[in-house]
Image (tube, rainbow, N blue to C red):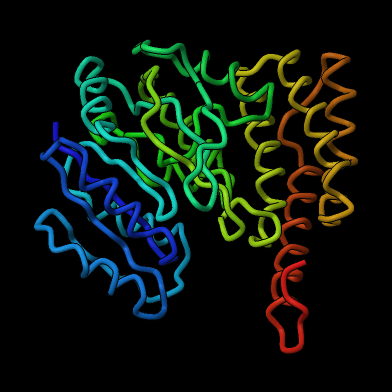
Amino acid sequence: MSVSILIPAFRPTYLRQAIASALTQGFEDFELVIGDDNPGEEVRKIVEEFQDRRIRYLRTSGAAGALENMRMLWSAASRPLVKYLFDDDLLMPMALIEMVAAMESYPNSSFCFSNRYIIDNVGRVLEERKSTTEGEVSSIQGHSLITALLPIVTNRIGEFSNVMVNLDSGVEFSDIERFQGFDIMMLGDMAFYLNATRKAPAVRIGKTLAAFRIHGQQHSSPGYNPWFARSLCEWEVLVRCEYDVRRLDAGKALRAARRLQTAYASWEPQLPEIKHLQPELAVFCDELELGRAAGVTEAFRTGLARLTDDIEKRRLARLSPGAAGPD
C-alpha cells in the first residue's frame, strides 16, 4: 500500500528534522507533500534544501491557519494511506513499514496508531507513552475506544503525527472539523478518531513509531494559542454528544463530567471565559446522578457560543496596537 505523508508547515524551527525523519524510513512507496503556511520564505528555503523526487511543495495564501493547511494537503494526497506529520514532530525509523504492515493486516480499518515518545525542544526523550501492549497489533472497535478515552478526558491515542489514515474506509476531512453538528477547532484529532470508528475499526500497534515535541510555540500551548480554552470545552462537546446517542453510558459520562469540572475550576483564573460553561456542567453532573440528563442542551450551546465570543475578543485585544502580548 502506498502512503502520502503530509506536513502542514508554518514554523521553520524543527522542520528540517521532520522532513529528514520522513525521508529516511526504509520504505520507498510514498510521496511527501509539504504545505507552506508561512507568510515569509523561511519554510520554502528549507524545503528546497532537500533535493528529493518524492517531495511535493504546495503553498497556502499565507497564515491561513493549521486547519486550512491540513485541508489543502488532504485534498492533494494521491495515495490511499495518509500520514500527517506536524512540522515539529518526528517519525521513528521504520514507522511507515510498521504502519503499512498493520493496515495490510486489517485492510478494512479506518486508521492505525502506535505508542509515542514525548520529546523536548532539543529532542531529548521526556517519556514514552504507551496506548497499547508492547508488540501487540490488534483491531479496536469504536465503543471500546470511546470508553477508553472519554471517561478519563485524555487523548491516549496521541496526535495526528502518531496516526495513519485509510482513505478507502470512507473517512473524510469533515471528520476532523465537525462532530455531531458542532464545529471543532482544537480537538480535531479526537473528533476524527470518534467519527472514523463509526465507519470502521481502528488498529493499535504496540511499538513506538513517532515523537511528539513539547515546546512553547505549539498549537496546544495555552500561552501561545488563545483558543486553548476551546480544547477544554470541546471535550465536553464529545462527552455530551456520545452520551446523547448512548455510545457512552451515564456512569462514564459522569466520570468525564466530574473531571471536566475539576479542569474548569483549575483553568478559570487563567481562562475566565470558562465561566460560561460551569453552571450547565454542574447541572449535567447532577442530572446524570439522577438518571435523567440530556446531553446537548440549549443552555450548553449558549454557553459554548459565549465562550467562543469571549475568546475571539481576547484574541483581538492581544493583536491590537499597544497590547502587552501573550499572557
Give coordinates of residue 267: x percent, y percent. 83, 47
| Quarter of the figure that contains the N terminus | top left
Q: Residue at x 19, y 20 (%)?
A: 104
Foreground: 120 or 36? 120
Q: Residue at x 40, y 55 (%)?
A: 87
Q: Residue at x 52, y 19 (%)?
A: 145
Give coordinates of residue 102: x percent, y percent. 26, 20
Looking at the image, residue 119 sits to the left or right of residue 317; the answer is: left
Foreground: 310 or 1? 1
Does 170 sit above or below residue 231?
Answer: above
Q: Is residue 202 visible?
A: yes
Does 306 sit above or below residue 245?
Answer: below
Foreground: 212 or 155? 212
Does 278 sit above or below residue 68?
Answer: above
Q: Is residue 201 visible?
A: no
| Quarter of the figure that contains the C terminus | bottom right
Give coordinates of residue 175: x percent, y percent. 43, 40
Give coordinates of residue 204: x percent, y percent. 39, 19
